[in-house]
Image: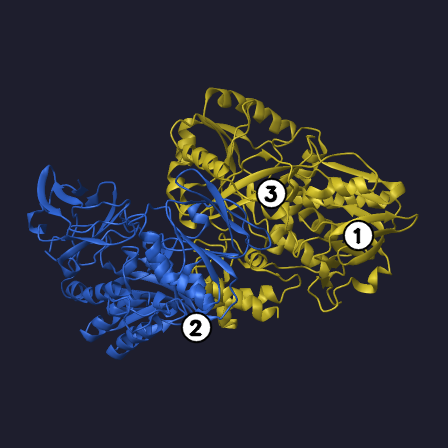
Amino acid sequence: MTPTVTTAKDLVHSLPDGGAAAYDVTVIGAGVVGTALARELARYPIRTALVDGSDDIGNGTSKANTAILHTGFDAVPGSLEGRLVREGQRRLAAYAAATGIPVERVGALLVAWDEEQLAALPGLLAKAERNDYHAARIIDAEELRAREPHLGPGALGALEIPDESIICPWTTPLAYATQAVRAGVHLHLDCRVQQIDSGPDIHTLTTTRGPLRTRYLINAAGLYADELDRQLGHDAFTVTPRRGQLIVFDKLARALVDHILLPVPTAAGKGVLVSPTVFGNVLLGPTAEELDDKTATGSSAEGLALLREKGRRILPELIDEEVTAVYAGLRAATGHEDYRIRDYPDQRYIAVGGIRSTGLTASMAIAAYVTELLAATGLALGTPAELEPLTMPNLGEASPRPYRRADLIARDPAYGALVCHCEGVSAGEIRDALASTVPPRSKDGLRRRTRAGGGRCQGFYCGAAVRALIEEATP
Amino acid sequence: MTRRERTVDVLVVGAGPAGLGAGAELAASGAGHVEILEREQVAGGIPRHCFHGGFGTGRAGGAVTGPGYARQCVAAAVGAGARLRTGITVTGWAGPRTVDTTGPTGLERITARAVVLATGARERPRSARLVPGTRPPGVYSTGELQQAVHLFRQRIGTRAVVIGNEAVSHAAVDTLRVAGVDVVALVTDQPPSLPTALAPLLVRARHRTPLLTHATVTGLTGRERLTGVGLRHHDGRTTTLPCDTVVFTGDWIPDHELARRGALTLDPGTRGPAYDASYRTSETGVFAVGNLLHAVESAGTAAAEGRAVAAPVLRRLATGGWPAERPALSVDAPLKWIAPNLFDPDGARPLQGRFILRTARRLPRPHLVVGQDGRVLHRQRLLLPAEPNRPFRLRADWLDRVDPHGGTVRITAV
């Protein structure tokens, strides 16, 4: 089967068939939730389309998060989110191991910095138990100091969650999308949905690339899910973007921290976290700012100053290290403490809204849950098949990257020819990414697939060479 | 894991002017098997993409361009018998003088009797400067800009703002002009260094470009493409300069990853390895030269240090000696750093008998005082102002008054 990925830059840039032949299911939004859904639906003998307004998958909220694979220890007990996070964590951990998505089980410590926070730990421990998580325990200041010797002064104790893990937030949706497309799902990028006209059997989507017809519709549009939902006549939720600014520190800071250091939530608000990344960096953030603008992904001087102030308290030496990146993500907050997943069988429509920062962890469970809902609405899905196994390129530092593998380099010297020195990215990996099933269309897209240009020099050495490789591959 | 294990006499890491200078002089002096490793495909370092003149002569108007100078350096090293290997990256240490490498020919583990680090320096990118705002295309460092224009002939943009006002900033302006980009302004957070009325005129005369002093970058705007650079002026006014390109120049930082991974002691001021006048770091048998030590001096200075390291390396190969504890040299604010920054117990003098220093703010006629454990060793009045991002120098003829077993030697501007 020839994979179908289309973009506005294609020679024939209207949608295939001019939208005449209807898809069985169309998923709007190719973030981590939409791609997981497309992958799940790809197992069935139905025609599925995945559409997104941007030029890449995972290019909205999914690309800018804290990259944590949660246990769900602190979810609201009994909530849908809690259930899907726990189930999603098991599914994604297994999937990551099978496909080579980088995951490191570093564990989390909720560090108490004052008596109020210390007093909150037993309650959090009890909540973890209610969420069916039984490995948590409270450790005292002395053990905490031994486990994290670079912590700032004044830490009084911590709640340890040994199974909290870090994960590659970019490889995950890319693996989903790759498997989906290889199994026959049509991925249409640069394809913003402007209007939805629903007939008795068919929804007609007016998109920036022409009409698209579909029998069933799944709204996984993230920040824009409420607007689509209203187009279909509902007023179930409102998405208020919550901006999270984050600072990424250089790999040389990695030795300063061994766990995800989480804040203890109290009435006074939520603090910021310090976490290693699977790429070997250290992350500080996020801020939490309620905004009106769904495109406000810029950072602010105040936000960065706040992060540095809080970071200095948690891990004083971190602030002296070089910063490799600053970014801001928008979380799709709805004002409800749970996901907003709802099916409308009469409309052949399912809304998957309010998927907050836990969406990465829960993505596979959300996909399975929504697919069940879809079957219940009357769509005959048919018999599921096994998807072709997939191995993703390794971007993580916990196992050898290609430039450290004599076997790979012996087979293909391009894996020993480094282009991006800060991140150790070889010409072979860049070539592979540019020729992959879901190829990058920009420097940012290539960076998310390979790490090229994502290091401490930010392109001082390799920026022009990387751009030349992209321009060669995409004339 | 299959690694080819090899031994050499001297391993030089980095083939810019400093590393090539070291390789040339060492090979010519009979140091044995001298191998230079360069991670780029082409040796020569930063001069490779500096298409302006002034290299090798110390004069801005000199005829030798960066690429020409890079070729001269390469020819000298190879001609002297050093083995130059490009496209080979040192990925870490496997012992005190043993490194692991990767390259298209596979993985190696190279043990040397002496290692010379010459990994250079880079400009701090926008992110490391914590400039807020969006992350659109159109944001460059000078290094990336010069390579894009001169080596790859890439399209840059139409209107650019250049952040910085040092030699490299003016090189960026020249490169933008070559690329057909209109330069809107040079922006610096420093106060005017010349009488306010005069400075903009001089810059305008050279580049026909206004210089905005005392201005801080408050943010970048634009999504698909950069649309502007926000500024806050000294008097509190804020403005946005519309542009589709911005170049963050200067603000150099040593490329010290390998040094840190080898647990070399860093100087808190330079952020490069602490070193003495014999270019000896804290690790036995590991030397360092060039802009890894002091970001940044001219290519000529880096090359001269490379050549100067040959004698101490040869001495090390012959005698195996290495100093244990050496008093550090340390500066007080507003001075930023001094190099070299360790006392050399063997009596070596810094290059040209003078230390290099930097200041964080302009000092009109600085009076430098050198002291140790409460004793004043030296006083010196400089005749010219000390300017930020520009070198100024301190005589070294007081070094024989230093107590080799004493405390830190402090340099203060009063």
Q: Secondary structure at mark 3?
A: loop
Q: Nearer the viewer, residue B282 or B108?
A: B282
Say which quadrant the N terminus of chain A sits in.
bottom right
Measure the C-alpha gap from mark 2 to mark 3: 47 Å
Q: Type of residue at label 1?
A: Thr
The picture places residue A38, in percent across and down from the top left corner, at: 74, 52
Q: Is residue A243 left or right of residue B184?
A: right
Which residue corresponds to mark 1? Answer: A26
Same-subunit check for callouts 1 and 3 = yes
Residue at mark 3: chain? A
Which residue corresponds to mark 2? Answer: B105
Q: Type of residue at label 3?
A: Ala
Which residue corresponds to mark 3? Answer: A296
Q: Nearer the viewer, residue A414 or B199?
A: B199
Q: Is residue A379 left or right of residue A295?
A: right
Q: Residues within 10 Å of mark 3 (few under 14, many from 20)?
A: some
Colour yellow belongs to chain:
A
Q: Count how many numbered circles sit on residues in the image.
A: 3
